[in-house]
Structures are given as C-alpha cells and as structure tokens.
Amino acid sequence: MNFNKKSGEHNLGTEEKQLTLWESFLGRLFTKSKFGKLFIYTILIVWSISTIFPLLWVFLNSFKPSKEIITNTFRLPADPTLQNYLNAFDTIDIGKSYLNSFIMSGSVVFFTLFFGGLAAFVMARMRFRLRGVLQTVLVMSLLIPAFATIVPVYRMMIDLELVNTYWALIIPQTAGNLPFAILVISGYMATIPKELEEASLMDGCSRWSMFTRVFLPVSLPIFGTVGTFVFLWSYNDLFTSLVLVEQEQVRPIVVLLSHVSSQYGTDYGLMTAAIAMTVIPVIVFYLFAQKTLEKGATSGAVKG
C-alpha cells in the first residue's frame, strides 16, 4: 500500500517536472528567441490594427458629407466639416442623451460602490453563519445572464411604475453589478493586515468608523477599479436600456444610437458622428482611469 502511494507521488512529481520544463521551454522560445519575439509582435500589431482601424475610420468619415463617405470611404476628408456634429445636436438632441447616460451611469457607480463596499467589508472582516453559502450565491449569480432575468425585472418595474424613468435602469444595473463589486472588493479587503483592524478597535472605533476611516482610504485603488468597470458596463448596456427606457426624455445615448441607425440609416455622416460621440466619452474616461485600473489591479497582489 505504501509502495503504491510512493509510486503515485513519484509519477505526480515527474509530471510536474515535465510541465515545468515545457513551460520553461515555451517561455524561452517566445521571449528570448528572435522568432518568438517576431511572432508576438506580429500578433500584437495585427490585433492593434484590427482594433484601431474601425475607430479611425469612424472618426475620419464623421468629417465628411454622406456622398463623400460613399464614394471615398477610405480616403482623408477632401473638405473637412463639422456639420455632421451640428446635426447630431440639432436633429437628434444628442446632448440630452449624454446627460441621461451620465446621470444613470454615475448613479449606478455610486450605489454599487456604496452598498458593495459595505457588504464587502462584512464579508472580508467578519465571521458569521452561512458566510460561505452567501459567497457561493454571489459567485453563482455572476453566471446568470441579463437576458434570463429581464422579464421579471420588467414586470417589477411596471408594478412599481418606474418604466421610462432613471430608476428603471439604475436599480437593475446596480443589482447586476453588486455581486462583482462585493467579490472583488472583499478579496482586496481580506489582504489588509489585521493589525489595522485591531488598532482601530483599541482606539474605540465603531464598525462604521473602522470602515470609513481605515478600510475605505486603504481600499481606494480597488474602489476606483471597480467603479471604472461598472461605469463602462452601465454606459454600454444597450439591452436593458432598450427594454426599460423608451421615451426620448430619459433614453441614454446607446439607445439613441440604435434609433439613429434605424431612422437615419442613409445619412452616413450623421451616423458616424453619432458613433464617434458615443465612443469618445468611453475612451476619455478610460484614459483618465488607466492609472487607477493599473494600481487597483496590482496593489492587491502585494498587500499583506
């Protein structure tokens, strides 16, 4: 019996060594050899071109009249014009949709971080019954797509008379983002040294003071990272917006863009301008939040 156990451990150790050698070989092949570096750079260049080219095409064509887009779609604008952007504000009132998107997405970020931060603090620093069950439920909820819950959510919004209001998107989007926020923030807070918690208790801090004065300042990087993801997901959520918001007064910019493609499908100048104005806030927001994302993604790995 002991011989079989030792034999199994020996085989397992041999397989691990072979796997390590294989990983080491691949690492040297792709990082040190000229062929490996050429292969990696080729993949990255192709991926970059496939990502940047559609955006560049949209931005360039947004300065062309519709006729020029049809005849010279891949050339630089012969006579650049801002008329498409002026039409976007005059014809489809894109400014109002911008305001609606920022109000709703900003509210979703605020409520998600507030309730998610409190729940994450409890999950990370307190021990209670059924804590493991609750964490399992949170993980499982991430596997449920929005398409599977939209019918009961729509029915609930009708009963509450919230359809075609800001709350029709704020409530379900906040609920959908909370499991992600709780799991990520709690994982970060669990790495904070216990000495900080003990010192705050000795100083007479309540749980609320401990959260706001100790854990919240230390966890700002991960709050910024989660907030960035939540904002982008909420801003780009077309499916939920199409179902729950129909009136022009409250529809976000992604819904407006879908209406532009259906109502002004032949006005390519207006469409490209609307697409550009929809994408610009996302790019700008990500550029400003890039350092926060990097800090939140790396600092949690070295704490404790």
Image (tube, rainbow, N blue to C red):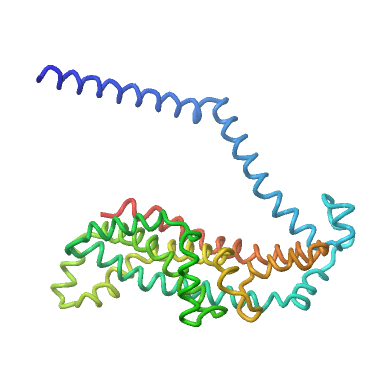
Say which of 45 and 151 sits in front: 151
Q: Nearer the viewer, residue 176 or 110?
A: 176
Of all residues, the one furthest to the left in this rendering is 2
Residue at image coords 79%, 67%: 264
Q: In which quarter of the image is residue 283?
A: bottom right
Where is residue 143 drawn, in percent x and y? 41, 53
The relative height of residue 228 versus residue 20 in the rendered view (above or below) is: below
The residue drawn where x is 60% and y is 36% is 43
Dividing the picture into quadrants, the one containing residue 277 is: bottom right
User: Horizontal and vertical percent for residue 152?
Assistant: 46, 68
Asked if residue 96 is positioned above or below residue 84 in the image, the reply reads below
Please provide percent x and percent y for residue 275.
Answer: 70, 63
**Image coords of residue 38 (percent x, y):** 60, 30
Where is 169 relative to 276, above or below? below
Q: The C terminus lies in which quarter of the figure?
A: bottom left
Query: Which quadrant is the N terminus positioned in?
Result: top left
User: How many labels sit on residues?
Assistant: 0
Q: As drawn, is 13 to the left or to the right of 271?
A: left
In the figure, is residue 68 to the left or right of 93?
right
Q: Please name whichever residue, 181 or 175, is drawn nearer the observer in this view of the structure.
A: 175
**Residue under the point 62% across and 42% down:** 47
Query: Residue 98 vs residue 138: left or right?
Result: right
